[in-house]
Image (cartoon, helix red, strand yellow):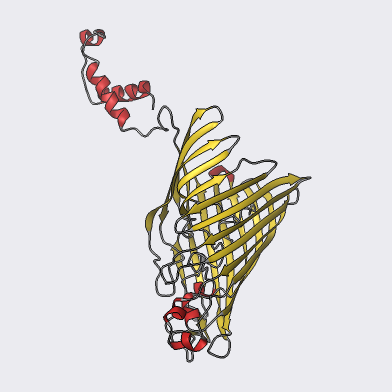
Amino acid sequence: MKKHGVSVALAAGLLAGGLSVSSASAADLGGNCCADLEERVAELEATTARKGNRKVSLTVSGWVAEQVTYWDDGVESNVYVSGIGVTLSSHFKMTGSAQITPGWQAGYVVHVETNSNDPTAFNQNTDDGGAGVTILQSYWFLKSDQLGKLSVGKLSHASDNVAILVDGSGSLVPANWVIFDGLGFAQRSGGLTFSGSAGAPVAGDLIWGEIGFCHHIGAGIAADCNGIPQNAVRYDSPTFGGFSVSASWGEDDFWDVAARYAGEFNGVKIAVAGAWSHYSEGLGDLTNGHDSDYFQVGAYIQHVPTGLFVYGAYGYEENNHLTAASLAGGGLAASAGGFAIPDGEHFYLKAGIRQRWSPLGHTVIYGEYAQHTDMVSQRLINNGFNSSELERWGVGIVQEIDAAAMSMWLSYRHHEGELSDGTIPGTFNVDEFHIVKFGALINF
C-alpha cells in the first residue's frame, strides 16, 4: 500500500472515531499537527504486507486441494476426507527475484506445505493420516540468461518428478504413477489380513506400499523413486530449441542428471524427459550403507485439434547392496546365504481426450494402467521374498473451471497383486482393493 493510500485510510479512521480538528490547526500545515499522523502512517506501513521491497520482488502463489475417498478391500469399506498426498498437498509458495545487471538475476523460493490429512498414512483402522506444516523447499538462486541457473538449498533436484511432469493432460494430480491413495492400507488374502492368515509370509499386516517399495529413497510409493526434495546444489541450463539439461548433487550422497524436451509440430504437442540418479551412503536400516541407481523416462503426446493424448512413464531401480538381515546373519538370512535386494521395474500408461466441451473449461477423460514388478520391501526381503507384482488400473474425469483457476475430479482405481519366489513355497495372491475419489484443487 502506498503512503498516500495509508494516510487517507488512517485519516478516515480518525475522523470516524470522532476526532475534532479546529480550523486553526487544520490550516497550520507547517506546524506539528501532522507529525503524529506521519508517525502513525510509518508504523502502519511497517506492519503492512507488501510485494517485496524496493529491490527484491515477492509473489505468493499456491493451491488448496482436498478430496473425499471411498475405499473397499472386499471385507471393509469406508469414506475418508483428506488432502491429496505429501508433495502435492495444499501449500503456499513465496518467490521473488531482483535484477543484478542486464541478463543476471538473483532470487529465492520458500515452499510451505500444509497437509490436512495425508492419504499415504491412513488405513482401515485410521482415518486420520496426520496433519502438519512443513518446509518443502527453501533455496536461493543465481540466474543468467546465457549461462543458466544455479540453485542452493532444499529444493526439487534434477531428477525429482521428471517422468511425471511431462504429463500435460490436466489429470496429473488425480492420476499418476505414485500410489498416494491406498499405500498404507493392509492387504488381504482370502479375506484375511496377512497377520491373521495361516502361513502368512510375514508377522503383522502387509501393506500395499510393501509391494511397491522404492529402495532408492526408502519409501513404498511404487514409482518416482527419487521424488522428494533434498538439500542440494542444482544447475539448469538455458533452453535451446526446446531442449534443456539439469544436474544436481546433495547429501548423503546422491547426484543426478536430467534432460527435457518440449515442442509442437503440426498441431501435435510432444514432451519427453529422462533422468538418472545415484545414491550411496546410508539409509538408516542398512548397516553397510546404500548403493542404488534409478533411471526414469516419461513422454506425452497430444493431438491438439482432437484433444486425444497418450502419456507413458518407465522406471528401473538397480540395487547394489544387501539387506540388514543378510549382514546380521542367522535365521533365514543365513540359510539363504544372504539376501540381495532385487532390482525393481515399473511402468505407467494413460490415454484419453482433453476437449473444451463446456464454457467452464476443458474436460479430461482418461484411462490408466500401471505395473510394478519385484519392488519388495525390506521386511519382505528379510523374510525370504524377492519377487512381487502390483497391478493398477483406473478411469476418471477432470473438469477444469477456468474462471476460478480450479479443477474437479472423479476417479476410480483398482489394485491387485501377488508375492512369490521366496523361501516359503507358493504364491500369495492379494485380494482386490478399490478406491473412488472426488476432489478439487483451486489455485491462487
Residue in the image at 57% along x and 39% along y: 148
Q: Is residue 184 left or right of residue 304?
A: left
Number of dots carrying numbers: 0
Residue in the image at 56% along x and 61% along y: 224
Quarter of the rendering containing residue 28: top left
**Residue 160 is at least partly visible in this image:** no
* Quadrant occupied by the N terminus: top left
Q: Nearer the viewer, residue 32 or 253?
A: 253
Residue 82 position in % (x across, y down): 44, 61
Residue in the image at 51% along x and 69% along y: 215
Residue 219 position in % (x across, y down): 48, 67
Residue in the image at 27% along x and 28% along y: 43
Q: Is residue 119 left or right of residue 270?
A: left
Quarter of the rendering containing residue 38: top left
- From what the image shows, is residue 151 above or below residue 388? above
Q: Nearer the viewer, residue 164 or 318?
A: 318
Q: Is residue 49 left or right of residue 298?
A: left
